[in-house]
Image: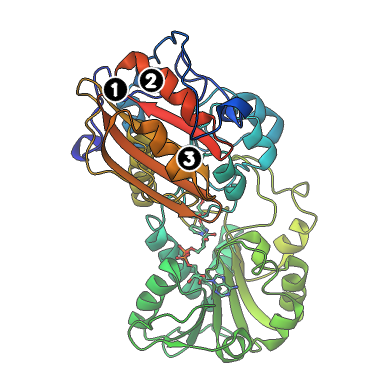
Amino acid sequence: MSKDIPIVQKVARSVSNSWSNGIAGLSSSPTTSFHSPQASFPGLQRSNTTQKALKPFDTKDIKVLLLENVNETGQTILREQGYQVEAIKSSLPEEQLIERIKDVHVIGIRSKTKLTAKVLNSAKNLLVIGCFCIGTNQVDLKTAASLGIAVFNSPFSNSRSVAELTIAEIIGLARQITDRSAELHAGIWNKVSAGCWEVRGKTLGIVGYGHIGSQLSVLAEQMGMQVIYYDVVPLMALSTSKQIKDLETLLSKSDFVTLHVPETADTNNLISTAQFAQMRSGSYLINNSRGSVVDIPALIEAMRSGKLAGAALDVYPNEPGGNGDYFNGSLNNFTDDLRSLKNLILTPHIGGSTEEAQSAIGVEVAQFLVRYVNEGTTQGSVNLPEVTLRSLTIDEPNHARVIYVHKNVPGVLRQVNNVLADHNIDKQMTDSRGEIAYLMADISNVKPDELKELQHNLTASSAHIRTRILY
Ligand SMILES: NC(=O)C1=CN([C@@H]2O[C@H](COP(=O)(O)OP(=O)(O)OC[C@H]3O[C@@H](n4cnc5c(N)ncnc54)[C@H](O)[C@@H]3O)[C@@H](O)[C@H]2O)C=CC1
Ligand SMILES: O=C(O)C(=O)COP(=O)(O)O
């Protein structure tokens, strides 16, 4: 599959890649090169000492750790680049992660692996994080940016899969399918129509009308449902759906409420006791977003009281890192309560788990990673400014690409261009995002043995976060 996709060509010798003090290639701490008092720009003295040239980049030096069963498509793309790829099926607990992440340049995860500030600060060689999923709440994006670590995700490759699962659940809940199935598995024939409904003509309330919510809206209308939605931003209504101005009104008008918001401080317990009270009696709740969005004890109460006729949960406040017998009591203290409820569909976070979604995500995120490692392109990054340069000339003699992640403070461009001024700047692009700025410059008339000094001079600024020179 990856052969069909145009990815960055692996340059035989070049696409060099180094960090602040990393002559021998790929090991160094970006923090070691912060602020050097004598060497502040722009009146920097050139060092007379003969510096050994930086080692040309070799893709075989790149170490990649993939967790949580990243799809084969993604693994193949990364292996074809010559990177050293290790793939593990589950996520890792923090202490193991800290140990394993120490010397890797690239980490690929899905929704379970928590890349906290503590973990990121121990990842001295880490260049880039690939979230092979939509959500990025499991990564401390701000800390990653402050360390010059780019984060990429796959913004919509599994949206359709989640929308289809939600459709299945809407009908499944309306017809109590999982209860009838469980009964018959247990040998009980229980043919009932009481409390079972068609979905045609019913109102679906979508909370969060982004990629998944809007896709779901189209599918639900095709089944004859009326769709209303609530979102924190005004969004164009698809087909005949209508945006509702507040959550309370949406809850009071919906037969089915389905949640498709990201995990943020604002969405924590978005649906709790007060919101269940605002829902229609005999309505249904579906949560395929994040476990933190629904207050589980309040849900249990709403189910027990009969306020809700059913619910579907794909996500939980505390999910296990891999497959196994985790849901028997120890994981969450409410699991026994959940398991005792009728017409409650419980699935193990499978919203995005289809062959189509996983294979597309594997390709998309692996491509982002390759472009970032080999070229420095941040297009698609969720935490760094998006910067790209039109073509890579670094395999020509005496050319290099300078990548400079720095604090977004006044005067840095002048400093950088003073350092680059002795060479020919073929092209340059810079952008900022909050406190972080990202600069790429292709320079010519630079000899390999001048690169170490160039790098030294670039890292001397107090605004410096990370420098890479590719040649
Ligand atoms: N169960 C699963 O396997 C999967 C779960 N997800 C979850 O679904 C979430 C949504 O995915 P997408 O639709 O792709 O995201 P999206 O970013 O395209 O859409 C999210 C929408 O929620 C809105 N929103 C944010 N805060 C809100 C609030 N407090 N109230 C109302 N609306 C709010 C945003 O404005 C946006 O329109 C992801 O962040 C992820 O956590 C995503 C994929 C698979
Ligand atoms: O894409 C997402 O955000 C999801 O929740 C899917 O997560 P997963 O890749 O199944 O761990």
Callouts 1 and 2 close, C-beta under 8 Å: yes
Left or right of 431? Residue 466 is right
For the point 72% across and 72% down, the residue is 299
User: Could you say whether the residue bearing mark 3 is in a helix, strand or loop?
Assistant: strand
Residue 353 percent coordinates (x, y): 45, 51
User: Could you say whether the residue bearing mark 2 is in a helix, strand or loop?
Assistant: helix
Question: What residue sits right under mark 3 in the picture?
Answer: 405
Left or right of 11? Residue 59 is right
Q: Earlier in the sequence, mark 1 or mark 2?
A: 1
When asked about the image quadrant of residue 291, the answer is bottom right
Question: What residue sits right under mark 2 in the picture?
Answer: 451
Any part of residue 389 in sight:
yes
Q: Which amino acid type is marked by label 3?
A: Val
Left or right of 89? Residue 237 is left
Residue 68 percent coordinates (x, y): 52, 38
Of 466 and 318, nearer the camera is 466
For the point 55% across and 21% down, the residue is 28
Query: How far is mark 3 from mark 1, CA to CA?
Result: 21 Å
Q: Residues within 10 Å of mark 3 (few under 14, many from 20)?
A: many
